[in-house]
Structure formats: structure tokens, C-alpha cells
Amino acid sequence: MMPELSVIIPTYEDWHVLPKCLDCLANQSIAQDRFEVIVANNNPSPDLPATLKLAPNVRVIHVPTPGSYAARNAALREARGYTLFFTDSDCQPDRSWIENGLAALARLRPIDRIAGEIELFPKGETWTTAELCDRVHALKQDTYVEEGWCATANLVTTRAAFDLVGPFSEYAFSGGDSEWGLRAAELGSQIVLSDATLIRHPARDSFAAMAKKARRLVGNFHQHEVLGTFEKRALFSYLIPTRNALLRTANDPNLTEAEKLRVFVFQYRLALVKFAECVRLRYLSRTPSRS
């Protein structure tokens, strides 16, 4: 029986969190035989953990080409469903994620992209400074939708959209979702936010995790500068957070004054990471880092 839809999950060094994501998919409110799950293993080795258990509708493909967008493209080539659901291996889809995503697409035709809501949660009972910073600034689907795109941590779309727009660009380790989404918007593809199409995403809980993400973002910006699609930023502009980032922190109603101060300091530390990465890319090694 041909599946009605395909769920695509890239994974890289995330075997420890993938089982929770798969458990959430095994507990969806729609029948399992209506959808397939394709896990794109982006690790250098094709070997799977001995403890990994896969439901009958789940399969793993090995994609040695580095980058989550290369992994998603490979899974797209394997996908048999007309409707496509994208999430990440550390995400936890709500039980009605697929059902509500399908309903949103059907209700909003000819709109062909649904940006599902992303709810961040902390690792422990209290939010670390890193987690607060991530909560304030990361995965803001409502803001992204206003710009014409959304994060692939929660994207629902159709095969026809990819036939129109083409695959994800694979030249960078970060930012491919915005690049693809803006390309789609330019071609007339419409996108809306669906609060009911919900996944939960762990907030990055350490400075190291946030710095890793910051370096990837700078690498994406650098690649755009090389290609000429972005105007080259002044090197020293990386030394301070952007005005919008500072205002977002200052105006966040869910932060106490003490928490805002902690996040401000944290942002300045991340700015130093971005500055150092920009120096490395422009004057030392021109190869963006994945870690």
C-alpha cells in the first residue's frame, strides 16, 4: 500500500534522542499505514545502534554527504508520499501533529506550505541562561512566516512545491530552510502558521551548544557573501549583538529583569564567537564548520 504522506527526519550524532521522536510518531492520532517515516542518517558510518528499534513504517537511509539539507534531499528522492512532513531528530511531535497538518493543508488550499508551531522546553525544571536565550531568539515561526519561510523543524508541504521550487541548497550547514522558503515565496508559493500543528523542541542548554549554532550561522552568511547573494558585513559588526536581537530580549514579557541581564551578557559572549568565526572564514580557513 502506497503511503499517503512521508515524514522526513535528518539525524547527525543524535541517536540518543531519535527514539523519543520515533515514539511520538508511533503514537500519532492517524493510522500508521497512512504514512512512512524516512530517517536520513547523515553520520559518516551507515551503522545503526543495536538498541534502535524501528516500526514497520520507518526506514533508515544512509546519506554520507555532510549536511542536514543534503540528508533531506536524499530522503525526498526516496519519499513516496504526496504530502511531506519535516521535523528533526530531537523534536517531539504532538500526537495530532500529522492529523492537524493534513487538515490545515486541506482547509487552506491552494496554500501549499504550513509552518507548524514550535514550542521550546528546558532540559530540567528551570531554564538555564542558554535555554532562555534560545527561547527568546530561536525558531520564531510567526516571524519567519511574515518573511515567507519557516524552519524545517516543523514544515508541512507537498511534492508539488518541491517540483516547483527544486531541492534544498546544500552549500551550507545552516540557513537552507530560509533559502528554500524564500525561493518558494518568490515563485508564488503561499505559507501560513498553524498553531495546532505542534512539535516540541528542546532548547539548547549550554554555551557550547549555542556557540556551535552561531558558528554554523556565520558559515552560512559567509557562503552567501562568497556567492554575492548577501552584502559583505563589516568584520567588527560581529562584535556586538544586532539591534533587533537586543530589543527582542529587552521587550520579552516572559523574562525577569535579572534574566534579561543574564541573556544580554550571554548574547555578547556569542557575538565574540561569531567574530572569531568570521575572522577564521575570511582570513584563515574558508571552509564553514559543522561543529
Image (spheres, rainbow, N blue to C red):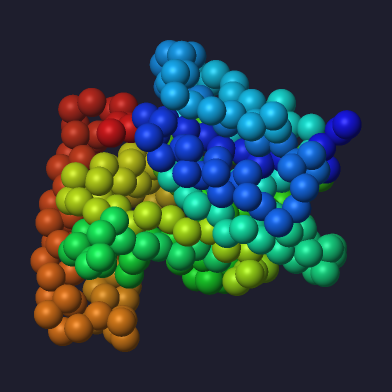
Residue extending farthest to the right is 1
Q: Is residue 97 above or below residue 35?
A: below
The residue sitting at 53% across, 71% down in the picture is: 142
Q: Which quarter of the image is occupied by the N terminus?
A: top right
Residue 73: quarter of image: top right
Compare residues 274 and 211 and report the one nearer the observer. 211
Residue 247: quarter of image: bottom left
Q: Is residue 129 left or right of residue 193?
A: left
Q: Is residue 21 above or below residue 59?
A: below
Q: Is residue 242 left or right of residue 79?
A: left
The residue sitting at 70% across, 32% down in the picture is: 57
x and y percentages locating residue 209 in the rendered image: 25, 46
Picture mark count: 0
Compare residues 222 and 44 and report the one nearer the observer. 44
Q: Which quarter of the image is occupied by the C terminus?
A: top left
Compare residues 60 and 20 and report the one nearer the observer. 20
x and y percentages locating residue 29 in the rendered image: 71, 56
Residue 226 appears in the rendering:
no
Q: Is residue 268 left or right of residue 179?
A: left
